[in-house]
Amino acid sequence: VIYRPNMIHPLVAFSTTCVGYAVDFFDTTLGAPKPLPASDQIWPIKAVFNSLGVIGLLIFMVSFTLVLLDTPVFSALRSGEIVQPAPVQDSGAKAWYWVLLVIGAVFSGSSFLFCMNTVYSKTTNFFVQTGPLTIGTWAALCGVFAIFCSAVFYGAYGKKHGWSARRAGLYLNLEQLWKTIALAVIVIVVSFGLVFAAHYFFQVDYRMYVVAFKTFGADKVLIALRYLPFFLLFYVMNSISANCFNYNTIGGKNGNILIFAFFNALGAIFVVASQYIYFYTTGYQLYGLTEGQRIGPIWLFPCMVLLFVTPIMSRIIYKRTRNPYIAGLINAMFIVMISCSNTTTILGGGELIATTF
């Protein structure tokens, strides 16, 4: 029997229909002393609580950061008052805001297609994981582009209209710098400590569909350090962009960051939507000539979620610190760690294996 579910590859692992097909297959080929109906499945209940764990861990990371700010060691990082949005009073500022968001989304989508076609399968003895290399290169390109856009904005508009890097929180003294790094590292260590504790005591981890926070071996930490600069370049700059350049009165109290988060994820959303709308319409993949094109949009499923969520996390922390680097460091270390612990590690013949497996 050949089972042909009418769904895309990422949904197969999260489908009661496909699980039922697997049960039917093993019942037919191997048999069972007390067979149960293929529809008798309880794993969706577990998935619901796993999803609550994902949400809870993200909330913990932000809350724990804010709690540490109240300790004597890290109190120097706390802002004296809640940081308020910059007022937008003229049409020029509004135009810059919307145009840069749109340009950023376009660059995000197009640069991912470039990485999908040119970086995939370029693994080496040093960069032994294809997924983090492709996503990391894409992230770094977006980070560099964000720096360029910010510089253009400052030179063409911001400098003439009172935008101040110091007032935005871009300057740190030496004490603030080392405490920023220490705080971020502590948050990451404790957060993943919860993941390991949950696995040790309850044999569970935190996962929501393709977003998974799981345990890992020590080797993954060393591998993640190789990719960390790529992710630091993006997530630190992304936090600066979200909070130092785009935290204003456009969209209102909550709408402003939701607008930014949407455009932050829009490039990834477009690639995924175009791939699968075309697939369901024609029966063919829009990007499907190479293995990299086929797997690339699948890698974007968790990216869509994380690119939307991380700016919101960074805004909450920034409003209480006027420091964009804390959330940037936390997000970068967190994302690179889950990226490197959820993918294939190639131990030899990197480019050949990645191209042909």
Image (spheres, grey):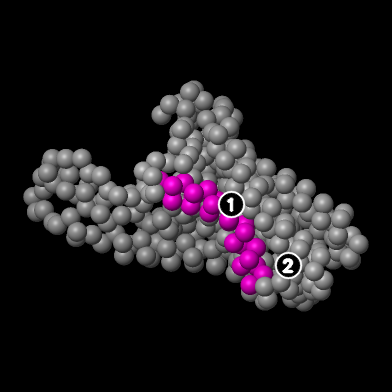
Of badges 1 and 2, the one in the foreground is 1
The image quarter containing residue 283 is: top left
Q: For this rendering, which residue is in front, 207 or 7? A: 7
Marks 1 and 2, the one that precedes in the sequence: 2
Horizontal and vertical percent position of residue 222 = 58, 39
Up/down of 124 relative to 234, above or below: above
Q: Is 193 in front, or is 206?
A: 206
Residue found 38% across the figure and 65% down from its top: 49
**Taking 29 as reference, is 168 above or below it?**
below
Q: Is 275 colored magenta in this rendering?
A: yes
Determine the main secondary structure of the stretch shown in magenta. Answer: helix
- Indicate the position of residue 87 as horizontal and vertical percent values: 79, 74
Instruction: Look at mark 1 in the image and give the residue it sits on.
Output: 267
The label on residue 5 is none
**Residue 28 image position (x, y, % from top left):** 12, 44
Kindly identify which numbered label has been placed on residue 247: 2
Q: Three-letter amino acid code at disc 1?
A: Gly
Q: Is residue 117 magenta?
A: no
